[in-house]
Image: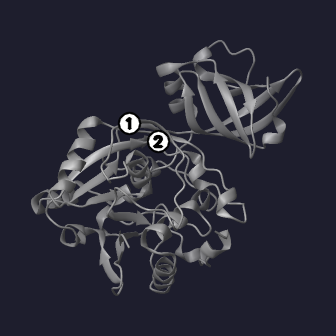
Amino acid sequence: MRVDLFDFDLPDERIALRPVEPRDSARMLVVRPESAFEDRIVRDLPDLLQPGDVLVLNDTKVIPSRLYGLRMREETAARVEIMLHKREGADRWRAFARPAKKLNVGDRIRFGEESESTACELVRLDAEVVEKGEGGDVALRFSFSGPFLDEAIARLGELPLPPYIAGKRATDEKDRTDYQTVYAKDEGAVAAPTAGLHFTDELFRRLDERGISRRFVTLHVGAGTFLPVKAEDTEEHRMHAEWGTITEDTAQALNEARARGGRIVAVGTTSLRLLESAAREDGTVAPFSGDTAIFITPGYRFKAVDVLMTNFHLPRSTLFMLVSAFAGLDRMRAAYVHAIATGYRFYSYGDASLLFRR
């Protein structure tokens, strides 16, 4: 499909730079097939679902994956910014480098302490460029591995707020909690599963009372989620792979709930993409562990997910393509026109939508 079909104009003032408080007081646009749009709030979610429905939430935890370092080459050095996006081994990550033209295979990058003569190895972290791909993508092998590398990244890295926020204000201490879900557990994401940012313990309590259960999956969101689609046709776009897992117990619980007539409600496009990657042709969900690069555009036949809760997405993005596949392109274009006209807040810290599958 032509990528320009997924374009729209968004005024700058509609981009949320901070979340609302409390989290579940955000607005939520309800989009049902063949029905008028409903302007609700996230706190209404229990009333919009049915007993027996199951929420599927992504419990990935964001790591401070933006690193600033010096490329060391013979007698010269150059500053580079590295955004980790996918772990490939105990000591190896794929990353986006900026400016990538300053890096060659074999170059060494030093993060942290800049001095060559520092006595304490723990205040610095070195990496070697072992591969260079397209669009600034590089593979790095670090001087530490496993938990020691994790500790070094946590100490030296910066929380990777999306560029549409980071370009307008500095990251601060408040973002360390604001940009994590209350149920984040499994470290490895470099972007938050933002639909989940709206949940509170009180909202979970009310969902429990309503008879709406929840299950957790893990998809480590990569920085590729921020990349614009530069191709003119969706057939020419390549998705970056992300690692995810669905346990056998979770798959069984979802299949049993659906067999009883309950609906699977994906909280966020990350949960949906993982569920659809694991879905069999008959709509049941299989256990899953591995990479997924699923790219969902209009025409895709959804097998596992019945309802999607998600935030409002960027124009020409793979995520707007996904919601257009789920609820219909014309329907979602109309929904976004309504959202912009009525003051909904967009993107990671913005409001939510609840989409019922077409």
Q: Is residue 341 left or right of residue 135?
A: left
Q: Is residue 203 left or right of residue 131?
A: left
From the viewer's side, name the closer residue of 91 and 333.
333
Q: Farthest residue in the top direction?
A: 119
Disc sitting over residue 186 in the figure: 1
Residue at screen point 61% across, 77% down: 8
Residue 153 percent across, percent down from the top left: 55, 30
Name the element at disc 2: loop
Q: Is residue 44 left or right of residue 178?
A: left
Q: Please tell me how crowded label 1 is: few (under 14), some (14-19), or many (20+) other residues with Cα within 10 Å.
A: some
Residue 356 against residue 174 in the figure, above or below: below
Q: Farthest residue in the front direction?
A: 282
Residue 336 against residue 90 in the figure, above or below: below
Q: Amino acid at mark 1?
A: Asp
Residue 230 percent across, percent down from the top left: 72, 60
Q: Amino acid at mark 2?
A: His
Disc sitting over residue 72 in the figure: none
Q: Is residue 324 visible?
A: yes
Disc sitting over residue 220 in the figure: 2
Residue 195 percent across, percent down from the top left: 39, 59
Which quadrant would the C terminus be assigned to in this image? Answer: bottom left
Residue at screen point 40% across, 64% down: 310
Residue at screen point 36% across, 50% down: 181
Quadrant position of residue 208 = bottom left
